Amino acid sequence: MVHQFRYHPRKLLYLTFELTTTFLFRLPFWVLIYVPRTLRPRQSWSLKKSILIRTLDRLNVVQGRTDSLQVFGDHLTVSEGPDVKHVWVEPTPQLINAEIQGCAEIANVMPRPIPGYWLDKEEMDTDIGMPPRPGEKVVYSLHGGAFIRLSASPHDIAANIGRGLLEHCDNVHRIFAIEYRLSKHAPDEPAHPFPAALLDALAGYVYLTRTVGFSPENIIIEGDSAGGNLALALVRYLVENTRIIDGLPAPPDALLLLSPWVDPNDTAVPPGSRANANMASDYIGPPEGPVALYARRAFLGPLAHVSNGRFNRYVAPGCADARMPHVSFEGFPRTMIVAGEAEVLVDQINTLVGRMKHDLGEKVRYHEARDAVHDFLLFPFCEPERTLALDAIATWIG
């Protein structure tokens, strides 16, 4: 069950209990058992990293029960602050094809205005929506969070990825991130299942190309975790429809996928699999757990009850189930995929890598970081793997 403690006074009591038991019991226990390096989830991890990742694991449980630990704005509101550069992005219903429109009608989803945020290099202060300089590259960022959490706000932890890219990539001077709608499911009121996020991501891409003026050849679409799923769906939509729908921009020059969640149907962790082995080291919880089940149901919505709806190329491009139709990546741009060796999603990511390399060959680059957890670029303490991955990305971007 999820969100069982989302209302006061139960939430206050539960959070007090968690805080007390963690400081008095869990932390001392973790310190005690992880002092010997051989007992740490990964022997290369420091004592500090081992404890911090176990803390992330516990925070994931707490957020699943309260739904209240990270709130920095949503698709209806914006984060405020002197360093926040936001813009409202208009929807693009005229660019939706019949297939996605049909999914939207089934899900009762309509295009709507949503916020987006600009993030600059530290030494720069670019005006909101300023036209690109000649040859300027931009990263279009789609944040993770299982389609149910986190935010595009520069105050959110998800912005650590954008800041890392800006720090390491000399040719990227700004990031644009869209505040796509998050999905909900019972016990909350169901809202914004697929294709809501895809409609929002498309609107953000059209804003970058048509309003700001970036050429697709200078755009890198980046997505982490669920954002990686969304980035793949957006690029697929552009690849399949750019010559069919009048006014639809061309696909981007490059696609960057960071620990992408590419099979929401995946609930199996068979013995002997890497996913099974990584249950002891990753922090995101088991794929059959209550948070994963909630996210899966929230994202798929009515699509889960449509014939073969769960095996849709837009939602599960890394699905290894025999019922999954062939997924083609012909026409996709050059792609870099980053994963952690110690993450639960590594098997489905490798399924995706194999499919993309089959169709795209050397246009696909895969970087698997040793002993790294899911979406490790979010966390500055995940070193040296974070810096090594960012340097590899910077070289790949050029």
Image: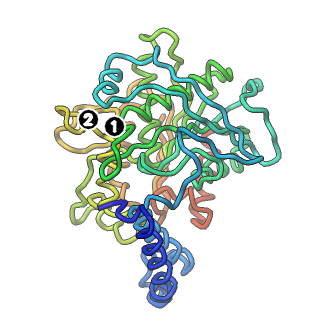
Give the position of the C terminus as an image quadrant.
top right
Read off the residue under disc 1: 315
**Callout 2 crowding tier (Cα within 10 Å): few <14, some 14–19, many ≥20:** many
- Using residue 187 as the reference point, say whether residue 214 is left or right of it: right
Residue 189 image offset from top left, x and y in percent: 34, 45
Residue 154 image offset from top left, x and y in percent: 65, 48
152 up-or-down from 233: above or below: below
Residue 319 image offset from top left, x and y in percent: 28, 43
Read off the residue under disc 2: 303
Kindly identify which numbered label has been placed on residue 6: none
**Callout 1 crowding tier (Cα within 10 Å): few <14, some 14–19, many ≥20:** many
Q: Check contact, mark 1 vs mark 2: CB within 8 A.
A: yes
Give the position of the N terminus as an image quadrant.
bottom left
Q: Which is nearer the eye, 398 or 131?
A: 131
The Cα–Cα distance between marks 1 and 2, rounded to whole angstroms, is 10 Å
**Res 361 visible:** no
Q: Helix, strand, or loop for circle 2? A: helix
- Using residue 23 as the reference point, say whether residue 211 is left or right of it: right
Q: Which is nearer the eye, 169 or 100?
A: 100
